[in-house]
Image (cartoon, rainbow, N blue to C red):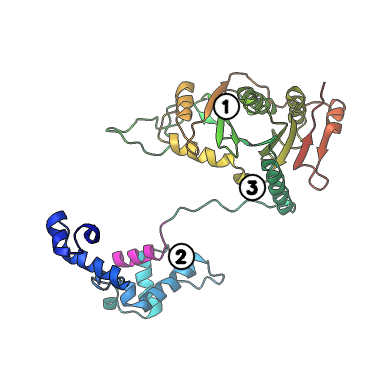
Amino acid sequence: MTIDYLDSRPRKAETTFGWDRQAVALGLNELRTGIACLGGQKASGNKKTEEKNPQLEIDIVDLAEAESQVDPKFQTPFKYTRITAKAIRAALISHKGWKHEDLPCEKTIGNILNRLNYKLRRVQKTKPLKKIKETDAIFKNVKAANRESDNREDSLRISIDTKAKVDLCDSSRGGTSRCQKPLRAADHDMGNKPKLVPFGILEVLTGLLTIIFGVSFETSDFIVDALEAWWGFNKEKHGNIKQLVINLDNGPNNSGRRTQFLKRMTEFADKYELEIVLVYYPPYHSKYNAIERCWGILESHWNATLLDTLLVTVEWAKSMTWKGLKPLVEVLQTVYKKGVKITKKAFNPINDRIIRHPLLPKYCLTIQPQLT
């Protein structure tokens, strides 16, 4: 503007537009010379404590790492105490030879720990309880099967699982909510309470989530009925789908050995003329199943709510979002009987139709439909 309309005159830019003429002059000079001028702001002000004393940072990291890495010989000042700013300060004096008067206060040391990323964190439940010898091979198969499905236009991959049962009561679920007065919950969980079984179906590539609540037990029949209900809602938009790849864990009601589950899935394949591929995650590693992340979002969404009725629970589930989308939520009112199984003789013709992975027969199964 100054060059085009004001003959490159900074003072005129100041009177016309109210711009600072020194800033305009600086910009014109930078444009003319091609040299960018940097201000001295970075050199001004008080430097951080660890910048003024690098040895302090080195000693703090040395002490903190001993705790974080868990020294196998337990040669650490934090063997029987937590790593806190107060404990770090004391350890700097007792183990690193610092004098009390040469160290900053506890608050400053706490700030240094935060800047070094030694922050207060919850203990994470990341270690699986067990690991079977086939775990790596199962994961490799899961990755290959998922990739193959995602690359096929006529294949749909879903992730399924049930969440922990939801008690319909006025008990506290923890969490906080923004309100003028706190919600009041019962101070004890007493008596038998109605329970809901949330079953989730996630269309992995699109992020479309369906939650179906059961009012009875989690059984093989409930799982397949929920799948049939989901397919009934969605089959029109998936008219081109010929193969359904299902990621699931190896739970007792949907394992690769559960006869009633396999019988119902075979019937599902025949009824809807779909090739069904059951792709199981390794035992004790179900957290890698995509649907598991949806449950964490749902729990965070309603954790400060009194879920005391079916209506309240369903409406709260409807109002959550997963990847910007609200889920489809339905209820199955069927009452299921536990422990349903079929005889070996009746299961043999069904089992003959199931194509099992040669090396992982319990963890990858394919069911071809019998076309009428």
Proximity of marks 3 and 1: CB atoms separated by less than 8 Å: no
Name the amino acid, label 1.
Ile
Q: Nearer the viewer, residue 276 or 296?
A: 276
Numbered badge on residue 212: 1
Q: Is residue 221 shown left or right of residue 117?
A: right
Task: Report the residue at 29% width, 64% height from top.
Answer: 107
Task: Report the residue at 29% width, 68% height from top.
Answer: 31
Task: Report the residue at 56% width, 52% height from top.
Answer: 126
Residue 282 lies, in percent from the top left, at 69, 47
User: Does residue 81 lie above or below 262 as drawn?
Assistant: below
Name the amino acid, label 2.
Tyr
Badge 3 element: loop
Residue 90 lies, in percent from the top left, at 35, 71
Q: Nearer the viewer, mark 1 or mark 2?
A: 1
Q: Nearer the viewer, residue 268 or 181?
A: 268
- Report the magenta stretch's main SS: helix
In the rendered image, which residue does mark 3 sit on? 285
User: Does residue 83 lie above or below 187 as drawn?
Assistant: below
User: Does residue 303 lie above or below 192 as drawn?
Assistant: below
Q: Nearer the viewer, residue 16 or 5?
A: 5
In the rendered image, which residue does mark 2 sit on? 80
Residue 132 lies, in percent from the top left, at 72, 51
Residue 134 covered by magenta stretch: no
From where the camera sits, is residue 282 visible?
no
Residue 118 covered by magenta stretch: yes
Please report the bounds of the magenta region as a residue range. Answer: 106-120
